[in-house]
Image: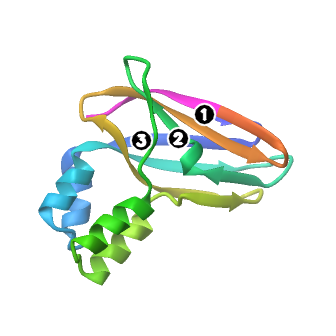
Amino acid sequence: MEKKGFQASARPLGHDQAASFYLARGVPPHLTERYAGNCVVVVVLHSQLAPANISLRLDDWRVRLADGATQKIRGRKDWLTELDREKVALPARMAFEWAQLPEEAEMNAGDSIQGMLSLPAKRGSVLDLMIRWKSGDDENETTIERIHCD
């Protein structure tokens, strides 16, 4: 998807691929499954020649499920709070944090960001990822449609 100098893509990860990534970094199996049991996607964002800097807030994004209902996306701060509460070792928490899409970002022309998200949908779902961003004072929205979560 490309709109007004902003590009976004979302590629679903299979359960085994997502789970093995976190297990190999020391995230306990029950927390890994809580994360990887949902639809996990790798999101790549790129600012080309946008008319102004791009501001992103994950809190403004939504997932639209097949029944039309929309859901907020749980960000890395919430996940990290859970990992801290479960006393997950620091190296595993750090690896988890760095693999996630940032909750807020400012992008200049030429900047790219990528990271994983665990979306509020079960595997096997088909969903839409609704992305909102600001470019200067302009608010923008686009949708990556029909993401198939394997």
Query: Where does the N terminus fall, quadrant-wise?
Result: top right
> Is 124 located above or below residue 28 in the figure?
above
Region of the chain picked out in magenta, as a range: 142-150
In the image, what residue type sits under mark 1?
A: Met
Hey, what amino acid is under mark 2?
Answer: Ser
Which residue matches tag 1? Answer: 1
How dense is the environment of label 2, judged by Cα within 10 Å: few (below 14), some, or many (20 and up)?
some
Q: Amino acid at mark 3?
A: Arg
At x 23% / y 76%, what residue is drawn?
A: 88
Label 2 sits on residue:
9
Residue drawn 24% across the image and 50% down it: 36
Give the residue number, with chain letter if any, for mark 3: 11
- Among the 4 quarters of the image, the one containing residue 105: bottom right
Residue 37, image x, y percentages: 21, 45
Given contact means CB atoms under 8 Å apart, are the residues at marks 2 and 1 in contact? Answer: yes
Quadrant the C terminus occupies: top left
Identified at 55% across, 50% down, the residue is 58
- The answer to whether the residues at label 1 and label 3 have Cβ atoms under 8 Å apart is no
Can residue 111 be seen in this snapshot? no
Left or right of 101: which side holds 81?
Answer: left
Circle 3 SS class:
strand
